[in-house]
Image: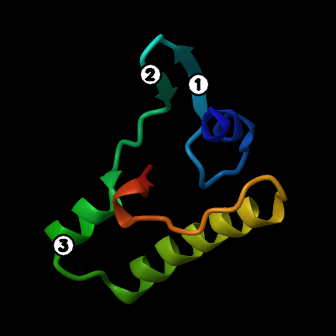
């Protein structure tokens, strides 16, 4: 519940926004904007390797989003699995 509430408060260009949250008796349904590029993990798996320029761009976007989360005192992520990173 707390995590979903926090997700709705995040506003950053490198964080996909939450559009709607539906609370059902047994679960939460979180509706987010579509990330047309898919998951970063899948992209890396298909490409086998990233060009340095591309890798640097993704790294900067990830660091920017994580810095934002850490600057907001109520939001601290200790782990961000590669599968939870999507490409726009």
Q: Nearer the viewer, mark 1 or mark 2?
A: 2
Q: CA distance from mark 1 to mark 3?
A: 31 Å
Looking at the rendering, which quadrant does residue 51 occupy? Answer: bottom left
Q: Report which residue position mark 3 lands on.
A: 47
Specify which label sits upstream in the sequence, 1 or 2.
1
Q: CA distance from mark 1 to mark 2?
A: 17 Å
Residue occupying the point 59% across, 24% down: 19
Q: Report which residue position mark 1 lands on.
A: 19
Most extreme residue toward the bottom is 52
Q: Nearer the viewer, mark 1 or mark 3?
A: 1
Query: Would you call the spot at circle 1 few (<14 residues within 10 Å), some (14-19), or many (20 or more)?
Result: few
Q: CA distance from mark 3 to mark 2?
A: 35 Å
Residue occupying the point 41% across, 55% down: 84
Residue 79 relative to residue 52: left or right = right
Q: Dot 1: what SS?
A: strand
Q: Which mark is residue 86?
A: none
Instruction: Give x and y (percent) for residue 53.
Output: 43, 84
Residue 77 relative to residue 75: left or right = left
Check whether the beta carbons of the residues at disc 1 and disc 3 lie within 8 A of each other: no
Residue closer to the observer: 14 or 84: 84
Q: Which mark is residue 27?
A: 2
Instruction: Give x and y (percent) for residue 2.
Output: 67, 37
Residue occupying the point 70% across, 41% down: 6
């Amino acid at each position: 519940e707390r995590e979903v509430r926090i997700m709705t408060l995040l506003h950053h260009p490198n964080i996909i926004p939450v559009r709607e949250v539906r609370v059902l008796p047994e679960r939460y349904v979180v509706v987010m904007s579509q990330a047309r590029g898919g998951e970063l993990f899948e992209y890396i798996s298909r490409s086998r390797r990233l060009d340095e320029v591309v890798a640097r761009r993704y790294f900067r976007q990830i660091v920017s989003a994580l810095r934002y989360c850490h600057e907001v005192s109520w939001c601290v992520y200790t782990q961000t699995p590669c599968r939870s990173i999507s490409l726009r």
